[in-house]
Amino acid sequence: MAEESQKWILMVTARTPTNIAVIKYWGKRDETLILPINDSISVTLDPDHLCTTTTVAVSPSFEKDRMWLNGKEISLGGGRYQNCLKEIRRRANDVVDEKKGIHIRREDWENLHVHIASYNNFPTAAGLASSAAGFACLVFSLAKLMQVKDDLGQLSSIARQGSGSACRSLYGGFVKWVMGNDVSGSDSIAVQLANETHWDDLVIIIAVVSSRQKETSSTTGMRESVETSTLLQHRSKEVAPKRILQMEEAIRNREFESFAKLTCADSNQFHAVCLDTSPPIFYMNDTSSRIISYMERWNRFEGTPQVAYTFDAGPNAVLIARNRKAATLLLQRLLFYFPPLPENELSSYVIGDKSILQEAGLQSLKDVEALPPPPEMKENIPSKKFIGDVSYFICTKPGRGPVLLTDEDQALIHPKTGLPK
Ligand code: DP6
């Protein structure tokens, strides 16, 4: 190594969004390389509300690769982490920092160790795709540190090997993960369909649903579906390819009706596949089903869809409203059916972009209590309320892709000790 001192530490910090699939990825044709059985399409969520921040540091004084997630050390021993680290190191380049007097040669990277600290700005336990943002951020920040050629497509194929859905988090806006054909996986990459400004009317409200149940992980669930579900075979061959084309067109032309119908149908088919798996998998619970029927009823009442719903491998609802007006009506409905527990504050029950609360005329719990039943409820049926069945709501929107954070204050690793701050 050109630099003799063992003291230097070089760091990079980045922030990466999470994403929600509107045409789902469910099923692999290669478990190790993580190659899917159909294309999928997602919307990137605004990183201001849901994101992972990761700092990666390198120093000749580090004795092994180490990682901390939300302050707790975790093992990097798993194959997925190892594959990502190996693929990035393979593409590393010479790195020179004149100010610090550092010169790392391409071949040095094999012998240098990294420290990684990662933090989610949302509760990991909430069951919101944290692995997607996490692996995307790990790969993006390592690539910046090791000055890997700036090719997001290539990086997406590395992030894919951490977690399939992570490859779609390398872009903002609307993203397609092309399944590819090659056995090496080199053509199984993410591509951006449109950036986050293309369809900026959309508003997203996530209902984080209270759940006591331990869920089957996506990885295990999809393996069992591939092995046992005939509906999944039909879906991947016949249904998903057609929906992908229709969804691309809906996004291109900002056709909400088609977008909403496809999104809801695809979520429902994914959960039907789960039920068709042996033994059956239940990701949604009673609250999820209730949300679906309320949304269906409202859309039918309006004559044209106001909202799309989609659920991943858990009970949380991701609701996409056609515009801000629809979002305020949506939030009023959600709070009418699912008011907070009396001890909750409205300001901690609805988080993220709080301006929607104001636009919906809701300033306090009193305003929530005073909400009238939605007009689509038949007058003779008393409208039931389900207090406490939703933990909280996150108001957000489609957002941008990964960014580098250059301010040292935002780094999660101490520049002197090389350990988490
Ligand atoms: C239901 O990407 O978490 O969210 O590739 O095994 O890590 P692995 O699975 P993961 O699966 C995501 C499944 C999904 C649908 C989707 O995001 O497309």
Image (spheres, grey):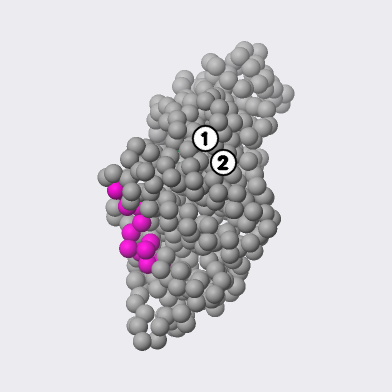
Q: Is residue 46 above or below residue 9?
A: below
Can you tell me whether the CB of the residue at mark 2 lies under 8 Å from the nearest atom of ligand 1?
yes
The quadrant in which residue 211 appears is bottom left
Res 160 label = 1
Could you tell whether 214 is left or right of 301 in the image?
Answer: left
Name the mark nearer the viewer: 2 or 1.
Answer: 2
Q: What amino acid is at disc 2? A: Trp
Res 248 label = none
The quadrant in which residue 207 appears is bottom left
* In the foreground, 70 or 294: 294
Q: What amino acid is at disc 1? A: Arg
- Quarter of the figure with the N terminus: top right
Can you tell me whether the CB of the residue at mark 1 lies under 8 Å from the nearest atom of ligand 1?
yes
Q: In this view, which residue lies farthest toward the bottom?
A: 380
Residue 138 seen = no
> In percent of the image, x 58 and y 61: which residue is there?
258
Q: Is residue 274 above or below residue 338?
A: above
Res 177 label = 2
Marks 2/1 in contact by CB < 8 Å: the verdict is yes
Position in image of residue 368 (x %, y %): 45, 77
Position in image of residue 10 (x %, y %): 61, 28
> In percent of the image, x 54 and y 61: which residue is there?
260
Q: Range of the magenta residues? A: 280-291
Q: Earlier in the sequence, mark 2 or mark 1?
A: 1
* In the foreground, 394 or 34: 34
